[in-house]
Image: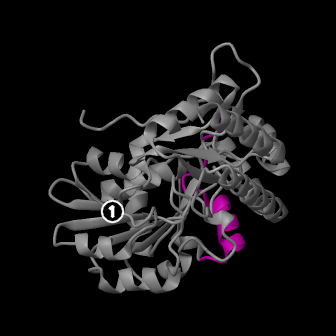
């Protein structure tokens, strides 16, 4: 009961229908057409149990990302894989490390198995490898690192150097989990697969909820050394992904053109949105995800801006629970949506001043 309830992004405003929802980092384009068609066809198989090995989806992921299919594991969103990792490798008497602005599910899942949570500071909203290394002790069992981060949108600047340094100085019996939920938006980052290939204690997590627009179906996947996959397969439910989720997920991953097109749309719109907000005095760090973290002078102004945006039908996300009370996380919409956000914040800013 000490676990603080996770609250998803708000999706409705009473009495309002023209809502621009930018509170949950959802793909504004929706999923690929092939995934929608696969979902319809899945209706013919709803009386059948899904496969327990997720083989077809795993093979598609392996071919797309050039990975070893035997080292892939699928979950009901990457949330479930975070939970399974805590169940398999943490518990009473051990510690789980995450960074101060890290994804809330790290804390929740660690506490659920009785582990002690250790939150280490970030440096200007960036993961601080030295702070993580300084927190490691004989009780450390798992380290969670989101790259790019949520809700910061920042990434580790010298990825290869810093992560290799972390791995080298971390005891081999400590699990290092690289959460790449937003890796699809970074052109030169594979989410951490390269480190899984060469080390025995590194896990990569990915999701189809963001880039592929399948948040409503809950499809996540991980890449890990065989001994870790074997353990996780023993503690997960055998039918943790539904038939529709598996079929739509497989179809979505096959659509490489969709990924390239949406990445360009998102990154172009993100740059424009950040630049326009900076021009009126709202700062944000360079984001590598599908959102920006807009920073205000103080918590009062951030919450007042959120209240104003809600009054005009725009929903963003307060992130005080992530230790960032003076900021708002704004999902990157299409260009029309970006214009609506900028116009709203400009009006709020004029009124405030």
Residue under label 1, please give it.
121
Is residue 153 visible in the rendered structure shown here? yes
Q: Position of residue 24 (x, y in %)?
A: 60, 41
Residue 88 left/right relative to 350: left
Q: Position of residue 190 (x, y in %)?
A: 61, 74
Residue 37 left/right relative to 331: right
Kind of element beneath mark 1: loop
Residue 230 left/right relative to 18: left
Residue 98 left/right relative to 205: left
What quarter of the picture does the C terminus occupy?
top right
127, above or below 337, in the image: below
Q: Residues within 10 Å of mark 1 (few under 14, many from 20)?
A: some
Is residue 30 visible in the rendered structure shown here? no
Q: Position of residue 158 (x, y in %)?
A: 51, 81
State the residue in front, 27 or 296.
Answer: 296
Q: Residue at x 37, y 34 (%)?
A: 5
Q: Position of residue 3 (x, y in %)?
A: 29, 38
Span shown in magenta = 47-67
Q: Residue at x 39, y 73 (%)?
A: 227
């Amino acid at each position: 009961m000490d676990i603080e309830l996770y609250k998803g992004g708000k999706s409705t405003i009473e009495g309002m229908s023209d809502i621009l929802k930018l509170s949950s980092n959802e793909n504004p384009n929706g999923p690929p057409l092939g995934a929608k068609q696969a979902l319809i066809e899945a209706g013919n198989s709803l009386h059948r149990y899904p496969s327990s090995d997720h083989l077809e989806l795993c093979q598609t992921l392996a071919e797309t990302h050039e990975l070893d299919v035997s080292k892939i594991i699928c979950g009901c969103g990457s949330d479930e894989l975070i939970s399974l990792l805590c169940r398999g490798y943490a518990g009473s008497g051990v510690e789980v490390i995450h960074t101060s602005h890290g994804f809330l599910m790290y804390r929740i899942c660690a506490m659920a198995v009785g582990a002690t949570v250790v939150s280490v500071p970030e440096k200007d909203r960036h993961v601080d490898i030295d702070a993580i290394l300084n927190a490691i002790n004989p009780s450390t069992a798992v380290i969670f690192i989101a790259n790019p981060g949520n809700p910061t949108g920042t990434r580790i600047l010298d990825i290869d150097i810093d992560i290799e340094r972390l791995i080298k100085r971390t005891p081999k019996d400590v699990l290092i989990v690289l959460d790449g939920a937003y890796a699809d938006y970074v052109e030169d980052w594979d989410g951490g697969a390269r480190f899984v290939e060469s080390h025995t204690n590194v896990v990569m997590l990915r999701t189809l909820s963001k880039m592929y627009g399948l948040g409503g179906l809950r499809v996540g996947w991980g890449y890990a050394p065989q001994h870790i996959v074997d353990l996780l397969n023993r503690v997960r439910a055998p039918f943790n992904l539904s038939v529709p989720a598996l079929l739509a997920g497989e179809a979505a991953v096959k659509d490489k053109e969709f990924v390239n097109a949406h990445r360009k749309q998102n990154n172009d719109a993100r740059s424009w949105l950040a630049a326009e907000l900076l021009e009126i005095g709202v700062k944000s760090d360079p984001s590598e995800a599908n959102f920006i973290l807009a920073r205000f002078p103080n918590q009062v102004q951030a919450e007042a801006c959120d209240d104003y945006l809600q009054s005009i039908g725009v929903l963003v996300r307060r992130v005080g629970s992530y230790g960032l009370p003076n900021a708002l996380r704004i999902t990157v919409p299409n260009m029309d949506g970006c214009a609506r956000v900028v116009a709203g914040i400009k009006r709020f800013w004029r009124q405030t001043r």
